[in-house]
Amino acid sequence: LDPLVKTMLSGDRRALARLMTYVDNRHENLMDIMKDVYVRTGRALRVGVTGPPGAGKSTLVDKLITSFRKQGKTVGVVAVDPSSPFTGGAILGDRIRMVEHAQDDGVFIRSLGSRGSHGGLSRATRDIVTLMDAFGFDVVLIETVGVGQTELDVMNVAHITSVVLVPESGDTIQTMKAGLMEIADLFIVNKADREGADRIFMELQVMVEMFSEGRDVPVLKTQAVKNIGIDEVVQAIQNLSAATRQTAVKEGLLKEEVLDLVSGEICAQVAQQSVDGGSLAALFQDLNTNHRNPYVTAGEILGRLSWK
Ligand SMILES: Nc1nc2c(ncn2[C@@H]2O[C@H](COP(=O)(O)OP(=O)(O)O)[C@@H](O)[C@H]2O)c(=O)[nH]1
Ligand SMILES: [Mg+2]
């Protein structure tokens, strides 16, 4: 076992943080390291929290941490914000908000922006979650912005995904019915203190009734800032985790995971070889200087791969 992995598995938070920078920088031994780390995973309950910007996801995550901590559970948090180039914007705000938990040894918070995402944000998220799981956190919360395909990819790593909406989300619900149902195991109407919350709540209930195909998809109301409805969310998550969805989709998820790893690795290697001195440097140089057709260049690179 890699000494750093060993130290991390013994409960050393600094080793955990260092391994996370390996993920950021796509360390050359990352595949081998993650192979060893993966063996130690499978214990954590992985919960996705997704929804439009400003819905109150971070506020909710903050309160969920407190609620799980009350039960004595340790919590890892991955905040994914593709719009953040590094730690600017929302992610920095989230950090400040969650600073209270930073003093708590049972909590570890990690932000992921678009930086260093050769090989994909979903790949980086997956690796960070895997590290947190292996480290021994009972619960790993994954916050992502948005409710589209990117978020779906990121959320493949979660056992249970909660979609957070607000009274203003009526249009989202109307236009995204099928998509929302595909993502959500649980709906949360946050900002329930605002007008229109009951209407959204009922719309969601009707939608679930129509499209859930017998699946139990709870709809809950919260006021995250006031810590109202949070314990109920935790309870619903724990009830769901006892149910079977996780195993029902597992095969599909593992295939996705392998595809994700392979494409991420190919991307990373091609990027590595694209720089000066790399075996693909000339191709990329030519692309720049002669404005070659990117499809042709991509085809040439793919042509060099052999499938045995
Ligand atoms: N009125 C109201 N505001 C809330 C509630 N929960 C969060 N907010 C506010 O909504 C804003 C966005 O919250 P944030 O957690 O950053 O949203 P995120 O972008 O989804 O992570 C902040 O100003 C919060 O204080 C709530 O239950 N009611
Ligand atoms: Mg946020």
Image: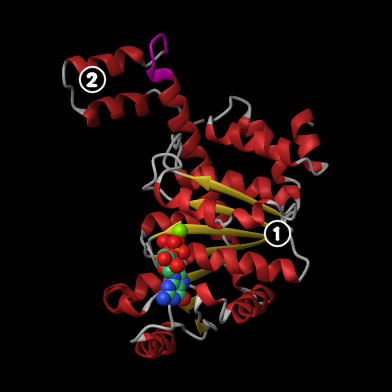
Most foreground residue, 271 or 62:
62
- Mark 1 = which residue? 44
Amino acid under disc 2:
Leu
Above or below for 196 versus 13: below
Q: Quick check: which quadrant has ligand 1?
A: bottom left
| Residue occupied by mark 2 | 287
Q: Main secondary structure of the magenta part?
A: loop
Which residue is more in the foreground, 304 or 308?
A: 304
Q: Who's the residue at 43% across and 83% down the image?
A: 193
Q: Hey, which quadrant is residue 10 in on the image?
A: top right
Q: What residue do we see at 35% from left, 80% from top?
A: 167
Membership of 276 in magenta stretch? yes
Q: Quadrant of residue 13?
A: top right
**Coloring scheme of the render?**
secondary structure
> How many C-alpha atoms fall within 10 Å of the one at disc 1: few (<14), some, or many (≥20)?
many
245 with respect to 259 (left or right): right
For the question of whether residue 302 can be seen, the reply is yes
Q: Is residue 178 magenta?
A: no
x%, y% of residue 285? 27, 14
Q: Is residue 15 above or below residue 242?
A: above
Q: Residue shown at 38%/19% (left/top)?
A: 274
Looking at the picture, how far across and down is residue 220, in whole percent? 51, 83
Q: Which mark is residue 86?
A: none
Q: Secondary structure at mark 1?
A: loop
The magenta stretch is 273-278
Q: Which SS class for mark 2?
A: helix
Q: Residue at x 49, y 78 (%)?
A: 223
Identified by mark 1, the residue type is Ala
**Where is residue 297 shown, x and y percent of the image?**
27, 25
Sequence-first disc among 1 and 2: 1
Residue depth check, mark 1 versus mark 2: number of the one nearer the observer: 1
